[in-house]
Image: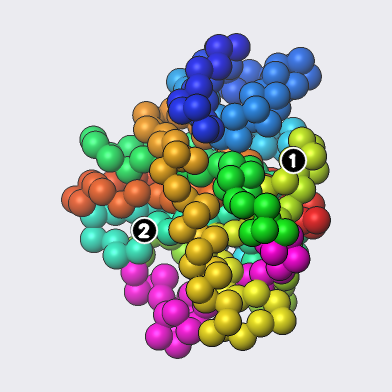
Amino acid sequence: MDVQKITGSLGADVRGVDLSRDVSDDMLAEIRAALLDNLVIAIRGQDITPAQQLAFARRWGEIHLHPYMEGMPDYPEILAVIKRPGDKKNFGGSWHTDQMFSPAPAMGTMLYAKEVPSAGGDTLFTNQYLAYESLSDTMRALASQLRTVCVGDNFKQSGGLSRKQRYEREMTEMKVKDPGDVQTTSVHPLVRTHPETGRKALYIGGHVQRFDGMTDEESQPLVDFFMKHSIRPEFTCRVRWQTGTLTFWDNRCTQHFAVNDYPGDSRVMHRITVCGDVPF
Ligand code: AKG
């Protein structure tokens, strides 16, 4: 397996892996090491079916079902992330970490590129260990005391419309559902400890509405500071897709952002999220 870093902060291109074949335990351990070292790995040159992607994802844990989005008809565990020329909504087009509104958010996400625009459509990632470590001692101490209230459906920011109502107007092919009884508001520590590496990371993203025990007004300037800090350019990398790239990212120590810079073009990805732990 060949691993080439994308930037000095995070991200690596991985070659020499064939996910259409059985992945041995040794190979899986190498992939895990590459993920934990680089936080985001772009496994290049794959040609896999939905069943093969699902089999690979299951090696990492249970599959997390998206409470708001319908999966593919034959593979409910796989969400087709589709953007067509007329679509207003760019799924993932703000900085976030996946399913932060869940009590046990997704550990990792794998996105497999089926169709990519002729130019653009990259995904940006940012390293949240660096975001935490680069705070002053005083700010780190403050951050360690804060807990975020994370919501799946931020009515306030969306003119009173539900996520389902908004998405139905703004997307043509992605199918939205109501979450029903699934919990979509959760409180998490602003600083979390990665359960595998033991390192501390800032845990913030677009689902954060406010800090627990504080008003919206009190929270907003601090939320804005932590968001702005967490996406400083020197913490980031950019994954450029090719058809057949499978990018796997660790949601416990990163945020990501899908860039919408391909007007008139289409982009189709197959997405699977793996369940994670309750952040601590
Ligand atoms: C997500 O799957 O959570 C996204 O944000 C999509 C990222 C992308 O399409 O590049």
Q: Earlier in the sequence, mark 1 or mark 2?
A: 2
**Magenta segment: does it hold 153?**
yes
Helix, strand or loop for disc 1: loop
Cβ of mark 1 under 8 A from ligand 1:
no
- The kind of residue tagged 2 is Asn
One can see residue 44 in this view: yes
Residue behind mark 2:
90
Residue furthest left as drawn:
264
Q: Which mark is residue 267?
A: none
Query: On the picture, is 89 further left or further right than 26?
Result: left
Amino acid type, mark 1:
Arg
- Specify start and end residues of the magenta stretch as a single range: 142-170
The vertical placement of 24 against 253, above or below, is above
The residue sitting at 59% across, 29% down in the picture is 38
Does residue 231 lie above or below 208 as drawn?
A: above
Classify 10 Å Cα crowding around label 2: few (below 14), some (14-19), many (20 and above): some
Residue at 71% across / 68% down in the picture?
146
| Mark 1 or 2, closer to the camera | 1
On whether ligand 1 comes within 8 Å of the CB at mark 2, the answer is no
Q: Residue at x 70, y 27 (%)?
A: 32
Mark 1 neighbour density, 10 Å: few (under 14) some (14–19) many (20 or more): few
| Residue under pointer 1 | 199
**C-alpha span from label 1 to label 2:** 32 Å
Of residue 185 and residue 265, the one placed in the foreground of this image is 185
Q: Residue 30's quadrant in the figure?
A: top right
Residue 50 placed where, x, y %? 56, 37
Residue 138: x and y in percent read 67, 58
